[in-house]
Amino acid sequence: MWQRILLATFAVCALCPAAAWAQGYGGPLPPAEPTAIAAGPQTGAPGVYPPQAPLPSSPSPSDWHPPHAAAPTYPSAPVYPPQQPYSVQQPNPPQILPPPRYYPPPNYGRPSYVPPPAAEYPTVPSSDGTTMFPALGTPTPGSHWMFSAEAIWLQRVDNTSVILGNTVTDYGAGLGYVTDILTSTDVDFPLDSGVRLQGGYRFNDRNSLELTYFGLQQTSVGRSIAGDPVGNTILAYSPWTQTDAIIGGFDNGLSYTYGSRVNNAEINQRLIATAGPTWTLAGLWGVRFVQVADRFNLNGSDLSTGDFENIDIRTANNLVGPQIGAAWTSYWNRLALTTEVKGALLANFNSASYSNLNSSGVISGNPVGFYPFDQSAHGTNVAGLVEFTFMARYRLSAHFWLRGGYQTYYLGGLVLGPRQLANFDHSGGLSLAGPSLGIETNW
């Protein structure tokens, strides 16, 4: 068997070189000699060449689609229903919303979508079309007039104290020591009660006019330092009296009384500067009048001699001038909280009277050497006022509010009673502070 395979292998190797050479190994074969073509008849017709195979051509439609095969069909484009305006499904009848607005932005050729404005916070409409206050804020819709009445309690505190006198022990030969001192601020003024009334007219939600008055009933405080009328071991002296210096001291004692009265009236225009969903900021300007009146008495008496002396001082301060202020109000449902500050530059038309005519040295002529006097003075100076108020208001109904707050006033440039003992003085100052409670209505 293997002999046959070996013989076949030799036969293939012998035939391959011949085939390769015939196809170009060693160079191309020489062209064949042209064959002479016999001439045709003597008519001169060209010779006849053997027929050539036709050139291939592109297939015709009949080659692809035989007559017996149906032409293929394609589905037509779907037909869509006409577009409807954009709407939101709502109960009868449906609400048709306008199409969105498009505006060409500057410097660009592409349209841009402009969303509709955001919904505003609910506000109270006013008669003139403005809406500045939250839905539950003041004032009541459509109201123009406002009136409030409050009980007010203010405590007076003077900024300076005047030494009125002292008591000393007397052991003879000038021996002794100070046992007590009397000053003009030994006793604090109590919370003096009064009333505050306020009325106003609202032109619109931004502009209103207000008239305010408050007054305190006259209150009085005092204190005494006692001597020793039995043994004359304790005597009272004052640097402002004459009788004690003449007789050698008051054996009964020394005392003072101090009375005060305050009135205030102002008219202001309030303007809403800006507002938010739950707050407003307002400014105000106006004219203010303040009256501060003092009545001060210093007296000493001596039982051994029956002598006595009274010094009566009365002062009046009438302050008038412009003021400005600002108020911040925040709202929480039915509650409104207001913080307000005011400042005023005032002219003080003041007066003071000083008299010791109600003394034994004038009435009975004792002690001898007593000098009577009855003087008065008038003047005008610049004074100032600063007010700070915190007020809470709670809506009880559509037209009624409950009011409560705390207020502080400071006044400078005043003629105060104890300070007139030395000479006419208009550099005094005082503060008033306390709570208030009342009711407000608007219509």
Image: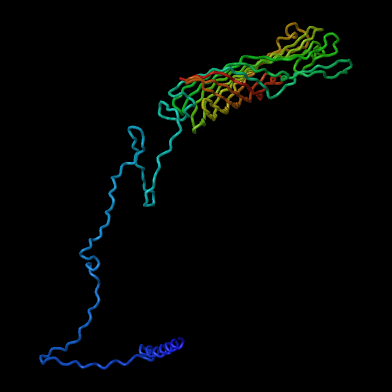
Question: Of all residues shown, which one is farthest toward the front?
Answer: 1
Question: Of all residues shown, which one is farthest toward the left?
Answer: 43
Q: Nearer the viewer, residue 314 or 220?
A: 220
Work out which quarter of the rendered image holds the C terminus and state it. Answer: top left
Work out which quarter of the rendered image holds the N terminus and state it. Answer: bottom left
Query: Relative to 39, does residue 320 appear above or below in the rendering?
Result: above
Q: Nearer the viewer, residue 200 or 223?
A: 200
Q: Nearer the viewer, residue 249 or 200?
A: 200
Image location (x, y in percent) of residue 379: 62, 22
Image location (x, y in percent) of residue 315: 64, 17
User: How did the renderer colour the structure?
Assistant: rainbow
Query: Relative to 338, does residue 115 appear above or below in the rendering?
Result: below
State left or right for residue 35 relative to residue 382: left
Residue at horizontal 43 percent and vertical 36 percent from the top: 119
Question: Of all residues shown, which one is farthest toward the top?
Answer: 364
Q: Is residue 382 visible?
A: no
State left or right for residue 233 relative to residue 408: right
Q: For residue 290, what is the image quadrant?
A: top right
Residue at horizontal 43 percent and vertical 23 percent from the top: 142
State left or right for residue 115 relative to residue 397: left
State left or right for residue 89 relative to residue 251: left
Q: For residue 19, what is the image quadrant?
A: bottom left
**Number of numbered discs present?**
0
Image location (x, y in percent) of residue 338: 55, 27
Residue at horizontal 64 percent and vertical 23 percent from the top: 431
Image location (x, y in percent) of residue 179: 82, 18
